[in-house]
Image: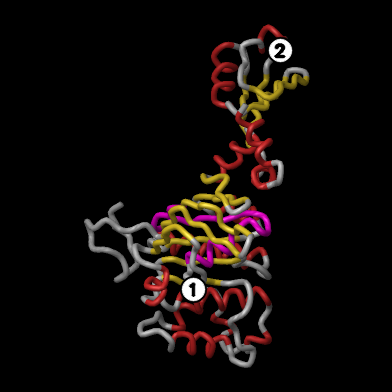
C-alpha cells in the first residue's frame, strides 16, 4: 500500500510501502493451563477502524495486551507498524485509551493533559487535544469532579498527545451520553481519514455496526469471523428476501434453492436464505415478483450465533 494520507511527519515518504499497522502470525498466549489466545492470525492496514469483539473470556484483552507489549506471547510473531510493540510505543506511535485508571483526581483536566505532555519529547499542544476531545469547557475542572464520560474524553485527549499512528480503545464511550458518543466517533472517523488506525473493543454492538470498517469476532482465543458488518451478519444468520408475488403457489416457488425456509403470507413471500442474491435473481427473472427487499438480521444476532458455545452448529446451519 502506498501511503498518501499519513499523519503529518509520521508516515513513509510518498512511494514507500507502509508496513501493516498490526500483524500477528500464529500468536498463542497461555496462562498456566488456560489458553487465552489460540493461534490468532491478524493483519490490520493503516487507516482502518476495526472493532475487536467477543464475549468475556474470549481472548480480546490478552490479544490487545500482546499488541501493546504488555504481555509476551508464548509463540508466534507480533509486529506493530513494522517493528516490535515496545519499539513502536517508545517512539510514541501507539496510544491506548483504557476503561479505568490512569487519572489523578486532585489535578484539573488541563493539568492532567499538561503533565502527560511533559512525558513526551514531542507532543501536540494541550489546547488542541482538549478541543479534539470536546473538553475545553471543563479544562479547569478537577478530574474527581468529572463524570465517567468526561474522564473517558480526558483519556482520549491524553492518548492523542503523542499523535499516535495506532490508537487502541477499550470500551471508549463508557459513561458518555448519546450526543457525547456521537461526537467522539465523529472525531475518530476524522482521524482515521488522515491515516490513523483505530482498534477498539466495546460492548455497544451498535457502535461496531455504525462506525467500524471491519469487525473481528473472537471466541475461545480464535478468530471466528472477520469482515464488514454486513458480511458478519450474513455469515451468522443469512438474509431474508421479501417480495410481493400475487397468487404465489408451490409451482412458482419450486425453483428456489439454497433456502432455510419459505413463508407465504397472502401476496408476500419471505425466503430465509444464505444465498440471497441467487434467490432474488430467481424471483425477479423467473416469477412475477416485485417490490423485492433483502434484509439482514442484526449484529447482536450474529454475535450470539458466532460466539456462543453452540456457534459451530449455528455456522454449519447457516452455510448448509
Residue 313: x and y in percent read 68, 36
Secondary element at tag 1:
helix
Residue 78: x and y in percent read 42, 61
Secondary element at tag 2:
loop
Report which quarter residue 180 is drawn in: bottom right
Label 2 CA crowd tier, 10 Å (few <14, some 14–19, many 20+): some
Residue at screen point 49% across, 89% down: 115
Report which quarter residue 108 is drawn in: bottom right
Residue to which mark 1 is pinned: 132
Out of 25 and 113, give the one closest to the viewer: 25
| Dot label at residue 248 | 2
192 horizontally vs 16: left or right: right
Q: Report the magenta residues as a range.
A: 42-67
Residue with the most extreme front position: 33
Residue at screen point 50% across, 52% down: 40
57 horizontally vs 275: left or right: right
Determine if the magenta segment contains residue 201.
no
Residue with the most extreme bottom position: 106
Alpha-carbon span between mark 2 and mark 1: 57 Å
Residue at screen point 53% across, 64% down: 64
Residue with the most extreme top position: 251
Amino acid at each position: 500500500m502506498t501511503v498518501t494520507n499519513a499523519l503529518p511527519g509520521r508516515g513513509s515518504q510518498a512511494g514507500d510501502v507502509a508496513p501493516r499497522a498490526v500483524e500477528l502470525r500464529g500468536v498463542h498466549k497461555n496462562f498456566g493451563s488456560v489458553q487465552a489466545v489460540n493461534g490468532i492470525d491478524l493483519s490490520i492496514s493503516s487507516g482502518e477502524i476495526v472493532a475487536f469483539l467477543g464475549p468475556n473470556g474470549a481472548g480480546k484483552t490478552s490479544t490487545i495486551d500482546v499488541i501493546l507489549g504488555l504481555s509476551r506471547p508464548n509463540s508466534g510473531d507480533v509486529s506493530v507498524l513494522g517493528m516490535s510493540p515496545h519499539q513502536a510505543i517508545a517512539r510514541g506511535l501507539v496510544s491506548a485509551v483504557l476503561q479505568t485508571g490512569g487519572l489523578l483526581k486532585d489535578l484539573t483536566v488541563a493539568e492532567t493533559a499538561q503533565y502527560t505532555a511533559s512525558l513526551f519529547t514531542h507532543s501536540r499542544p494541550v489546547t488542541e487535544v482538549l478541543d479534539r476531545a470536546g473538553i475545553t469547557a471543563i479544562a479547569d475542572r478537577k478530574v474527581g469532579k468529572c463524570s465517567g464520560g468526561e474522564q473517558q474524553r480526558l483519556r482520549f485527549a491524553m492518548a492523542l498527545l503523542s499523535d499516535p499512528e495506532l490508537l487502541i480503545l477499550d470500551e471508549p464511550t463508557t459513561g458518555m451520553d448519546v450526543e457525547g458518543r456521537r461526537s467522539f466517533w465523529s472525531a475518530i472517523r476524522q482521524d482515521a481519514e488522515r491515516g490513523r488506525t483505530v482498534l477498539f473493543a466495546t460492548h455497544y454492538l451498535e457502535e461496531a455496526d455504525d462506525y467500524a470498517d471491519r469487525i473481528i469476532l473472537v471466541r475461545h482465543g480464535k478468530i471466528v469471523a472477520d469482515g464488514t458488518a454486513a458480511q458478519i451478519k450474513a455469515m451468522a444468520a443469512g438474509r431474508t428476501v421479501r417480495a410481493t408475488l400475487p397468487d404465489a403457489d408451490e409451482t412458482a416457488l419450486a425453483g428456489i434453492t439454497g433456502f432455510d425456509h419459505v413463508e407465504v403470507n397472502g401476496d408476500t413471500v419471505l425466503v430465509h436464505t444464505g444465498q440471497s442474491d441467487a434467490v432474488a435473481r430467481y424471483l425477479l427473472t423467473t416469477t412475477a415478483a416485485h417490490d423485492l427487499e433483502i434484509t439482514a438480521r442484526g449484529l447482536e444476532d450474529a454475535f450470539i450465533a458466532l460466539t456462543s458455545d453452540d456457534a459451530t452448529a449455528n455456522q454449519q446451519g447457516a452455510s448448509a
